[in-house]
Image (cartoon, rainbow, N blue to C red):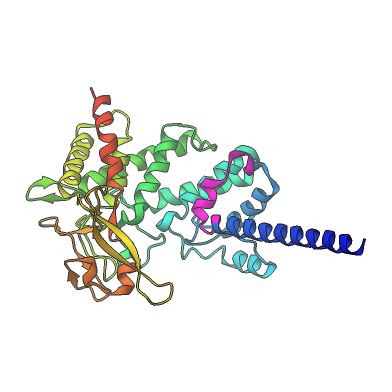
Amino acid sequence: MKKVSCILMLLLFTVSCKSVAQDAKGQSQSHEKITDWNKFIVSKEADWFATEEAKTVAENVLLYQRDFGGWPKNTKMQNPLSDNEKQQLLSLKSDPKGCTIDNGATVQEMLFLSKIYQKQPDEKYKSAFLKGLMYLISAQYSNGGFPQFFPLKKGYASHITYNDDAMANVLKLFMEIKNNSGYYSITPSAEIQSMVASAFDKGIDCILKTQYKQNGVLTAWCAQHDEVTLLPADARAFELKSLSGKESAKITLLLMSIENPSKKVITAVESAVSWFEKTKITGIKIESVATGKGDEKDKVVVESPDAEPLWARFMELENNKPFFCDRDGVKKDSMAAIGYERRNGYAWYSNEPKEVLKKYKSWKEKLR
């Protein structure tokens, strides 16, 4: 009996350890899934927004919003806050510094508030959403462009910012509200909707005016444009003025989503599509290979005849030639020619324009 008892105890202990390990693994995987705040929002099913957990996260979102209406960037708002952290955020409420549209900020928090309001229609969520909307309207330049930060920060952050789809994200939000699409559960007043419609039209006009002409031919856009002259502009030392193979994709998709587009919008799309076709790079792919130094990996360009097309992040304004930069701002002809840190710490190639080319035919057919 003792032997049987010991065996049973051993089995129970093994099962228990396995269960604990699985729970820990599950918790670890769950944590990995929610590290990115934006992915956290879009990964949640609609019913989750009716839960107490969603309500707790919503309280964080409200705390992080400044009285000015905007939110800071790169903040994991789903993470629990200590009492001390909550007090610090309350003390920052009146400080507008850091409010931005960079890296999805403000637009993604408004999406969260819309989702929870649909399931838990508390007026404080609606109020915060509308405050965010008025922040975005106020941030717009008279020429229709948007700076990266508002209130304005000195330097390149004041340029009209297409980088990382900042302005495209805002205009997409405006379009959904203007069209009463139902994508957002919160409907502003008729007066605010009119302001949104006007802001959207100004934004599209800015996009049309900033589309770069190369030897008299319309092409694409730069990641930043000067807020006064509308010309391509530099940002960080390794982000020199250039035509963007990445940011131009979301701008073109935005233009393609406009109902009953004007002739100018149609021309802009067709010109961008022609440019994407002209500048696509075939026969290569980007891989991460072991360097032999522990777990260290290095990005390299390898030949691959069957690979999908890629586009360089930066191309010369005069001739579309791809270039790459270290933090010293010196242009190089290949990704391999720049240092390890920048080579692996930045996206030098993009496949996003493939979505434009994929949708172009059906877009053209709708125009008939």
Foreground residue among 34 and 251: 34
**Residue 131 in view, yes or no:** no
Give the residues drawn in magenta, as a range. 33-49
- What x and y, as percent, mark residue 31? 59, 59
Foreground residue among 302 and 358: 302
Q: Please state if 323 lies on the left or on the right of 362 as rendered.
A: left
Q: Please state if 149 lies on the left or on the right of 313 as rendered.
A: right
- Residue 48, magenta (yes or no): yes
Foreground residue among 367 and 177: 367
Which residue is at 29% across, 50% downward?
A: 351
Q: Main secondary structure of the magenta part?
A: helix
- What x and y, as percent, mark residue 87? 65, 67
As drawn, 332 above or below 105: below
Q: Quadrant of the C terminus?
A: top left
**Residue 297 in view, yes or no:** yes
The part of the image, by quadrant, that contains residue 91 is bottom right
Which residue is at 18% across, 36% downward?
A: 267
- Residue 352, magenta (yes or no): no
Foreground residue among 116 and 130: 116
Q: Which residue extends farthest right? A: 1
The part of the image, by quadrant, that contains residue 359 is top left
Q: Quadrant of the N terminus?
A: bottom right
As drawn, 279 above or below 270: below
